[in-house]
Image (tube, rainbow, N blue to C red):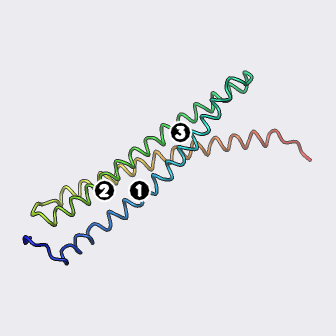
Amino acid sequence: MPETTLPSDIAHIIQLAIAPVFTLAGIGALLNVMANRLARVVDRWRALEDGLASEDELSRRAHHTELGVLDRRMVHIHRAIGLCTLAALMICLVIILLFTGQLVAVPVAAAVSLLFVVSMSLLVVALISFYIEVRIASRILRVTRAVLEAGKTPL
């Protein structure tokens, strides 16, 4: 590439980087959703933990069970957040390599491809972990609903 980069070259570099930038924006939106779910789990955890000392034995056991479920949910959501963050970092490296590969005569195609595949793999595992967390939360809601329905008296 010549020493002076033409505006058309810069435009081409930006065009190359647009797809990974959209992927990065999507991962950012996923991270926002996951962080909000984690915040809700933490809020519920704190509420249960605060009430443990003042409850009877039966309620305390039920709350300990729920705390165990919340702990499992937190493990999965933490994993999903960590993997999404790593995927986003890989996409950032892809963008950096795309720019440097166009500005400096260095072959980056193999590195870009590898980083993109690694990023998508991390994202797949993160989404699986997120799915597991959602399933755990849904299962608990179904059990709670069943308990409520069992307690209702016919009119």
Q: How many marks?
A: 3
Judge from the rendering whether residue 45 lies leftward or rightward of residue 127; answer left or right.
right
Whether 102 is drawn above or below 58: the answer is below
Q: Nearer the viewer, residue 19 or 140?
A: 19
Q: Nearer the viewer, residue 155 or 90?
A: 90
Distance from label 3 to label 1 (Cα)?
A: 20 Å
User: Where does the image place residue 34, in percent across and percent down from the top left?
Assistant: 49, 49
Whether 154 is drawn above or below 13: the answer is above
Judge from the rendering whether residue 8 lies leftward or rightward of residue 67; answer left or right.
left
Disc 2: which residue: 91
User: Where does the image place residue 65, in percent across and percent down from the top left?
Assistant: 63, 29
Q: Residue furthest bottom?
A: 8
Whether 9 is drawn above or below 62: the answer is below
Distance from label 1 to label 2 (Cα)?
A: 10 Å
Quadrant of image for the N terminus: bottom left
1 and 2 marks in contact (CB < 8 Å)? yes
Residue shown at 58% from the left, 34% from the top: 69
User: Tag 3, which secondary structure?
Assistant: helix
Residue shown at 51% from the left, 38% from the top: 74
Distance from label 2 to label 3 (Cα)?
A: 27 Å
Quadrant housing residue 12 = bottom left
Quadrant housing residue 41 = top right
Residue shown at 38% from the left, 51% from the top: 123
Residue 73 numbered mark, or none: 3
Of labels 3 and 1, earlier in sequence is 1
User: Tag 1, which secondary structure?
Assistant: helix
Residue shown at 79% from the left, 43% from the top: 149
- Crowding at dot 3, Cα within 10 Å, few <14 / some 14-19 / many 20+, comes out as many
User: Tag 2, which secondary structure?
Assistant: helix
User: Where does the image place residue 18, in percent across and percent down from the top left?
Assistant: 31, 68
